[in-house]
Structure formats: C-alpha cells, structure tokens
Image: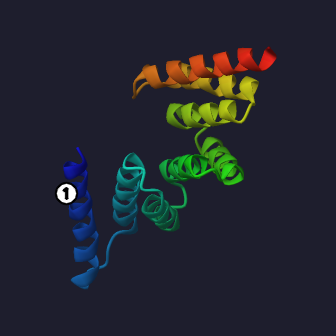
Amino acid sequence: MRYHSVILTNLLFFSLSACTTNNHAIDPAEAAALNLQLGLIYIKENNWLPAENRLRLTLQQNPASVSALNGLAYIFQKTQRNALAYDYYKQAESRAPNNPEVLNHFGAFLCQQGDYAQGMKRLQQAYRYNTFFSNESIKTNLAICISLSQLAKM
C-alpha cells in the first residue's frame, strides 16, 4: 500500500512540476485538485506537515474547498491543535452543512472534546445524509460517543 502511495505521490508531484516548467499556465482548479489529492495521501500516511502544507496550498488555490478545510481540521485534531481543529471544522460545516464526511469528523472531534450532545447530533446527521461512504465509520463514532457520554455520567 505504501509503495502505491509513493508512486501516486510522485506522479502527482511530476504533474504539478510539468505544468510549471513548460511555461504553460496551470489551471488553478486543476492545481488545487492535485494538491488536495497529495494532501489526502499524506494524511493517510500520518505525514502531517506535508499534508498540512498541501491543504493550505489547496485553500489558496480554491478557498471554497470543503475537503481541504475538513482535512486541515483533521490534521489539527491529530496534532492536538484543538482550537484550530474546531475553527476549521466549523468553517467546513458552514460551507457544507449536510456533508456527511464533515459531520462525521466534526462529531467525533466534539465527542473527544467532551461535547457529547453536539457530537452525537452531528453523527446522527452524518448517518442521515450519508450517500457516498460506508456508514460503519459513522456507527463506530456514534457508539464511541455514546459510551464516552455514559462513562462521563458515572
């Protein structure tokens, strides 16, 4: 798996390089999409700094990218920058209030922070709106949130 990620990363990098070294103007939307893909690959590898750099670049190229906002929020969550994570999740949610991926990540984050009611609310919304990825992640996060909530009451 890691070998395939390295190959894909190299291909994407060379695609970006080729666009700038041949004196051709690169389409900002295409550059943003490639940077987003690289950032998400780095996230899967837990390679936080290059992921953050690529996703920040994505936002410069496409300020409306909900996926970049969500990805940055996830990176900030994983690197214990919780105030930034919260801010970026809120931005992503405000731009795409029915996006199940954003709601799932934000809900799990809120539960980790002890805000069980808001976390469960978003996880339930994610489950309702989900049409494009497995509900298993949402169900798992919801179960964890319920368990944490019950433990907190003890």
Give 114 or 99, whichever is nearer the viewer.
Answer: 114
Task: Judge whether 70 appears above or below 145 on screen.
Answer: below
The quarter of the picture where residue 103 lies is: top right
Q: Residue at x 64, y 22 (%)?
A: 145
Amino acid type, mark 1: Ile
Q: Residue at x 50, y 35 (%)?
A: 101
Residue extending farthest to the right is 153
State the quadrant of the C terminus.
top right
Tally the marks.
1
Q: Is 136 left or right of 107, judged from the image as shown?
A: left
Q: Is 36 left or right of 116, judged from the image as shown?
A: left
Q: How far across and how far down the image is residue 40, in percent?
A: 39, 51
The quarter of the picture where residue 124 lies is: top right
Tell me the residue that label 1 is attached to. 7
Task: Judge whether 43 appears above or below 136 on screen.
Answer: below
State the quadrant of the N terminus.
top left
Q: How far across and how far down the image is residue 129, in percent?
A: 53, 24
Secondary structure under tag 1 reads helix
Give 117 or 18, whichever is nearer the viewer.
Answer: 117
Quick one: label 1, few (<14), some, or many (20+) residues within 10 Å? Answer: few
Q: Is 8 left or right of 65, judged from the image as shown?
A: left
Q: Residue at x 27, y 67 (%)?
A: 13
Q: Is 26 left or right of 130, judged from the image as shown?
A: left
Q: Residue at x 77, y 20 (%)?
A: 152
The quarter of the picture where residue 97 lies is: top right
Q: How far across and how far down the image is residue 47, in percent?
A: 42, 56
Task: Judge whether 46 appears above or below 134 on screen.
Answer: below
